[in-house]
């Protein structure tokens, strides 16, 4: 195999290292040849954005050329992925994929599977089995691409099994839980389930939410996994394969797919996919505790990872996805799948029948059904590792585990996560509040996180778990509720707005930190785990990634000065060349939230923090121009519009500058709520000025409102970022009280401060000052 090394453009920003690199692969004289850059006439090409130390994610996009055969496209897509991501694959192999070869037991199942697939493919559906073959070609390509990139570097050579295991691990993990063949050829029967194996089945939290006014439909998932797996990779595949081998056949529905995953893996593993522009597929693991079903977990079916990808690629509807996935059930990696199709959703009316399907699998049995009515009736569907269907629940053996599992898991709607979702879902009305719930963990204060023993609560009873924060010397009802290498390691969401942009999502890497503290290897109880070249600290923001692999920062998990400063101001002050291919600079930000939460103070503080980064030619202080309704509005016709135009002119003249609109709703009242011609003229002028704003103007418009619902939709669309500034948490209220009492003589105990903070739930910072 002949190859050429692509040129890596490396950007160093202190301790931040990010780079963007592209490559293509052609077939020349029967040999595969790599070249640097994007060549759209090649068989496949790709781009990788390495920003894991800045965002917690690397982003890979791989595209293939429909002018070539399905076989060549599949193999070339794997080649370019292995070639571009070789350094990540090598890193991950040191932390995770350490076994060079499968065990004798696993190899026997793989051999059985290969023989069975060979026989079945000769008589089975040709379309299905062709695409099964293409998946193997793609995995082979990943391995060959990796080895080509490391030609002449024997110290970096990997076995083919290490790449295969990256894709097979869901199946292999369940096969390894079977009674193994002993040296005497007899089965070694387990007397009872292994507690650690059982507890590891708590693998994800997921939610589908229709807002109260049915204007939006949101879906997302939080992966729960081991901490040393946090080498996060967001992939976008654009593979225009044809349904059949014929060049005249239609392109597959799932040619464009985006998903969270890991190096060397062509499926997700987390199992969150945006597919074919309108479909979203996700799951949480339900597991199997019934040993009687072990006999169905053999090699005479299709491995789970492959069934997943075939369904993603070929399905034209949620129902067809379920039908394809249920075929050839091998009984491994048993999940509850949610399949949502946005084409069935009409804002203001809801979801049409057929738009949302559930599928649940156990060994030997899979059931799927249309759950659209559940979503329309309840406004949400939450998933948390418990089967919904009573028969699946009973057959999986979960019911027999109830007492052993602390009694908190006995009913689908009675476990802690079910109750937290039910309590907090009504607050979810937009992307921001959806993100917050999907990562929620306040286990030291939330009564639904309590459990028997000491200290009386567990980081496992939350939407985004933090088992790593449980006490090493704690006493818990079962091992899985105590301290262990287990946490929510990411978050992924999408919405109607994002799906209209293609397979776009908002994603975050690392364990939740808003209420429980940031995960850092140095201070973690699990600092001795292999974590070579993983970020040292996981205080990353949410980012929004589009179908081309470009990303921009949305915000940190908490809305504060740092969130506004780092995510909006800092990128706008640094040279745009630093962010080519990674993110766009921001020119407009809207802060919203209840009165008294400090939105105005937040802007002033962030503006003050940006001084050191002002370009040398600018004034010492970044220019902040504040515009309140009283300073702009006038009884004279046309005067308010003139003042508004003047504010934008002044901001440009003093660039780089911030133009801050306090009480934006006074400038931009929804046209459906007013007939005042003056208000309409002012609104029109604001829209003109916002539309005219250019990035090279070096002006950032920041606005604040307590009444976001009253703002005209056209104005909302012109703000590139919206950041929620919510009411303070109990911990934040306690910190505020301490700050307010600083210098004041009082004999309050720490417990008194905590009691006051708990008693002032729903209070803003300004209300605390006067209260």
Image (tube, rainbow, N blue to C red):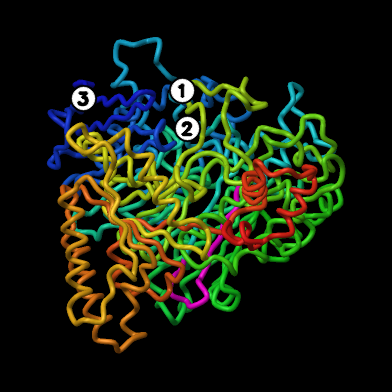
Q: Earlier in the sequence, mark 2 or mark 3?
A: 3
Residue 284: horizontal and vertical position, in percent? 59, 52
Q: Residue furthest bottom?
A: 675
Residue 533, numbered label: 1
Quick one: 110 or 644, which is closer to the camera?
Answer: 644
Instruction: Classify the position of the C terminus by image quarter.
Output: bottom right
The structure residue drawn at horizontal position 48% and vertical position 48%, both measured from the top left corner, is 560
In screen coordinates, is 734 left or right of 241?
A: right
Residue 212 is one of the magenta-drawn residues = yes
Q: Residue 72: which quarter of the image?
A: top left
Distance from the alpha carbon under mark 1 to that under mark 3: 22 Å
Are circles 1 and 2 on residues that touch, CB within 8 Å? yes
Q: Residues within 10 Å of mark 1 (few under 14, many from 20)?
A: some
Decide if residue 267 is on the left or right side of residue 614: right
Mark nearer the viewer, 2 or 3? 2
Cα distance, mark 2 to mark 3? 23 Å
SS class of the residue under badge 3?
loop
Q: Total number of numbered labels?
A: 3
- The residue that disc 3 covers is 6
From the image, tell me which residue sits under label 2. 231
Disc 1 versus disc 3: nearer the observer: 1
Q: Secondary structure at mark 2?
A: loop
Quarter of the image for residue 621 reads top left
């Amino acid at each position: 195999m002949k190859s050429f090394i692509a040129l890596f453009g490396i950007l160093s920003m202190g301790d931040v290292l990010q780079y963007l690199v592209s490559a293509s692969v052609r077939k020349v004289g029967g040999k595969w040849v790599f070249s640097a850059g994007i060549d759209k006439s090649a068989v496949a090409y790709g781009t990788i954005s390495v920003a894991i130390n800045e965002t917690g994610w690397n982003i890979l996009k791989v595209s293939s050329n429909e002018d070539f055969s399905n076989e060549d496209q599949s193999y070339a897509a794997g080649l370019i992925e292995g070639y571009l991501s070789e350094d990540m694959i090598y890193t991950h192999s040191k932390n995770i994929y350490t076994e060079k070869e499968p065990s004798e037991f696993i190899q026997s199942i793989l051999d059985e599977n290969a023989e069975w697939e060979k026989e079945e493919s000769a008589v089975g559906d040709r379309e299905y089995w062709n695409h099964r073959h293409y998946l193997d070609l793609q995995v082979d390509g990943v391995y060959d691409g990796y080895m080509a990139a490391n030609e002449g570097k024997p110290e970096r050579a990997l076995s083919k099994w290490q790449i295969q295991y990256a894709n097979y691990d869901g199946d292999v993990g369940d096969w390894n839980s079977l009674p193994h063949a002993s040296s005497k050829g007899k089965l070694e029967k387990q007397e009872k389930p292994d507690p650690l194996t059982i507890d590891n089945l708590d693998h994800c939290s997921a939610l589908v939410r229709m807002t109260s006014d049915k204007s939006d439909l949101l879906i997302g998932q939080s992966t729960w996994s081991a901490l040393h797996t946090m080498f996060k990779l967001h992939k976008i595949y654009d593979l225009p394969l044809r349904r059949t081998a014929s060049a005249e056949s239609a392109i597959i529905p799932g040619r464009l797919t985006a998903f969270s995953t890991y190096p060397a893996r062509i499926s997700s593993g987390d199992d969150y996919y945006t597919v074919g522009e309108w479909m979203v597929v996700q799951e949480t693991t339900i597991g199997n505790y019934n040993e009687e079903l072990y006999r169905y977990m053999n090699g005479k079916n299709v491995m789970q990872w492959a069934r997943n990808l075939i369904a993603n690629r070929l399905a034209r509807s949620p129902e067809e996805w379920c039908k394809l996935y249920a075929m050839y059930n091998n009984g491994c990696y048993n999940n509850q799948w949610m399949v949502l199709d946005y084409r069935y959703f009409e804002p203001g009316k809801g979801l049409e029948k057929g738009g949302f399907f559930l599928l649940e699998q156990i060994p030997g049995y899979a059931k799927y059904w249309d759950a659209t009515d559940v979503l329309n009736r309840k406004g949400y569907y939450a998933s948390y590792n418990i089967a919904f269907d009573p028969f699946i629940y009973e057959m999986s053996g979960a019911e027999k585990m109830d007492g052993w599992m602390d009694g908190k898991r006995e009913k689908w709607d009675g476990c802690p996560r079910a109750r937290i979702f039910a309590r907090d879902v009504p607050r979810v009305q937009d992307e921001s509040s959806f993100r917050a719930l999907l990562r929620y963990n306040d286990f030291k204060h939330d009564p639904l996180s309590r459990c028997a023993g000491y200290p009386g609560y567990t980081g496992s009873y939350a939407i985004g778990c933090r088992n790593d924060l449980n006490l090493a010397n704690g006493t818990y009802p079962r091992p899985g509720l105590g301290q262990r290498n287990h946490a929510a390691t990411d978050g992924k969401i999408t919405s109607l707005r994002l799906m209209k942009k293609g397979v776009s999502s908002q994603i975050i890497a690392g364990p939740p930190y808003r209420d429980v503290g940031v995960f850092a290897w140095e201070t973690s109880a699990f600092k001795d785990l292999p974590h070579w070249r993983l970020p040292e600290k996981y205080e990353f923001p949410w980012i929004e990634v589009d179908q081309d692999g470009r990303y921009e920062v949305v915000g940190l998990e908490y809305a504060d000065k740092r969130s506004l400063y780092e995510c909006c101001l800092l990128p706008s002050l640094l040279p745009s060349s630093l962010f080519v291919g990674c993110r766009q600079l921001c020119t407009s930000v809207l802060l919203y939230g209840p009165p008294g939460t400090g939105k105005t103070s937040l802007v002033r503080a962030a503006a003050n923090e940006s001084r050191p980064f002002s370009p040398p030619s600018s004034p010492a202080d970044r220019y902040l121009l504040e515009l309140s309704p009283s300073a702009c509005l006038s009884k004279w016709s046309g005067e308010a519009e003139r003042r508004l135009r003047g504010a934008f002119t002044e901001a440009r003249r003093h660039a780089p500058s911030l133009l801050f609109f306090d009480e934006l709703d006074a400038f931009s009242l929804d046209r459906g709520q007013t007939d005042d011609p003056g208000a309409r003229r002012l609104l029109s002028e604001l829209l003109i000025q916002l539309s005219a704003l250019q990035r090279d103007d070096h002006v950032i418009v920041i606005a604040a409102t307590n009444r976001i619902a009253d703002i005209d939709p056209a104005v909302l669309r012109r703000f590139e970022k919206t950041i929620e500034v919510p009411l303070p948490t109990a911990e934040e209220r306690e910190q505020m009280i301490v700050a307010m009492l600083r210098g004041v003589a009082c004999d309050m105990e720490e417990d008194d401060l905590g009691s006051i903070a708990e008693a002032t739930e729903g209070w803003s910072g300004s209300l605390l000052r006067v209260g």
